Image (cartoon, helix red, strand yellow):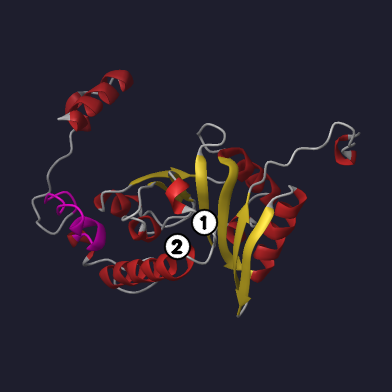
């Protein structure tokens, strides 16, 4: 009944009658909320029943979209991230998917002892209910603003075609500065994006004295893995950019 207590607290704080905050169970069996979710881990791997009549983010029928997304990330994680990036996953605890769609990346990490925060950008399709239905955790966020977390909170940040979208709305340097704030030293940033954006992120990472661990490009698409370093300027070294 913890959900009820949280709802009650919300209504008290907002001075809203409790009845208005109660979820009404749909009478139609195909509607979201009319059935209990499947048990773990089957709920993680199977498309929610209420997606059947919808169109997915990538243009296919939503259940087919969901299944294709999960297959894609299982293949990427097993064939690339677990072995080809030089990441010691045994030392990884907190992971963030900065542009989660269906939560497929987080689902592909289910056998690892990691905690994944799925972030749905505010300008993206609203897929957070699907992420919750899978038994995962997530949040909405505008990456042109700072993220509400302590500095150095995450071991790995994952950005799949996020930065190229953000360039149309805000300064990419400010986003990378926020990445620098929330990523711990020796943490990794994994970027999948077009080659132009990959080159921009690589250039900014080098200016921060980060280590380029892996870079690959093919057919105008690229993959980049960067490690945040412990670098600090020497006492006698002048930082010209800081001199006005």
Residue 39's x, y, as percent?
15, 52
Query: In the picture provided, is 132 more to the left or to the right than 203?
Result: left
Q: Is residue 144 visible?
A: no
Q: Secondary structure at mark 2?
A: loop
> Residue 23 versus residue 240: which sits nearer the camera?
240
Residue 100's x, y, as percent?
43, 55
> Residue 79 versus residue 171: which sits nearer the camera?
79
Which residue is denoted by mark 2 in the rendering? 82
Where 52 sits versus 149, above or below?
A: below
* Real-space CA distance between mark 1 and mark 2, rounded to the nearest whole angstrom: 7 Å
> Residue 209 versus residue 144: which sits nearer the camera?
209
| Residue 238 located within the stretch drawn in magenta | no
Which residue is denoted by mark 1 in the rendering? 87
State the quadrant of the N terminus: top left
> Residue 3 versus residue 96: which sits nearer the camera?
96
Q: Which residues are magenta?
A: 32-48
Q: Main secondary structure of the magenta part?
A: loop
Disc ID at residue 239: none
Residue 202's x, y, as percent?
70, 59
Residue 52, picture quadrant = bottom left
**Mark 1–mark 2 contact, CB under 8 Å?**
yes
Residue 61's x, y, as percent?
29, 72
């Amino acid at each position: 009944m913890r959900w009820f207590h949280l709802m009650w607290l919300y209504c008290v704080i907002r001075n809203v009658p409790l009845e208005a905050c109660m979820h009404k169970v749909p009478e139609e069996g195909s509607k979201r909320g009319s059935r209990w979710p499947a048990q773990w881990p089957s709920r993680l791997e199977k498309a929610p029943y209420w997606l059947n009549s919808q169109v997915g983010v990538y243009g296919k029928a939503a259940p087919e979209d969901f299944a294709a997304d999960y297959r894609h990330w299982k293949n990427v994680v097993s064939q690339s991230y677990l072995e080809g990036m030089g990441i010691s996953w045994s030392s990884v605890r907190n992971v963030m998917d900065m542009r989660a769609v269906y939560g497929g990346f987080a689902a592909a990490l289910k056998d690892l002892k990691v905690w994944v925060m799925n972030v749905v950008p505010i300008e993206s399709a609203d897929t957070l209910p699907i992420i919750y239905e899978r038994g995962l955790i997530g949040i909405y966020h505008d990456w042109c603003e700072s993220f509400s977390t302590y500095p150095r909170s995450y071991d790995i940040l994952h950005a799949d075609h996020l930065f190229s979208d953000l360039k149309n709305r805000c300064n990419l340097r400010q986003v990378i500065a926020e990445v620098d704030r929330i990523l711990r030293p020796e943490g990794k940033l994994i970027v999948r994006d077009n080659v132009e954006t990959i080159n921009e992120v690589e250039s900014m990472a080098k200016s921060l004295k980060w280590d380029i661990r892996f870079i690959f490009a093919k057919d105008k698409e690229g993959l980049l893995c960067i490690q945040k370093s412990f670098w600090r300027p020497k006492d006698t070294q002048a930082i010209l950019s800081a001199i006005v």
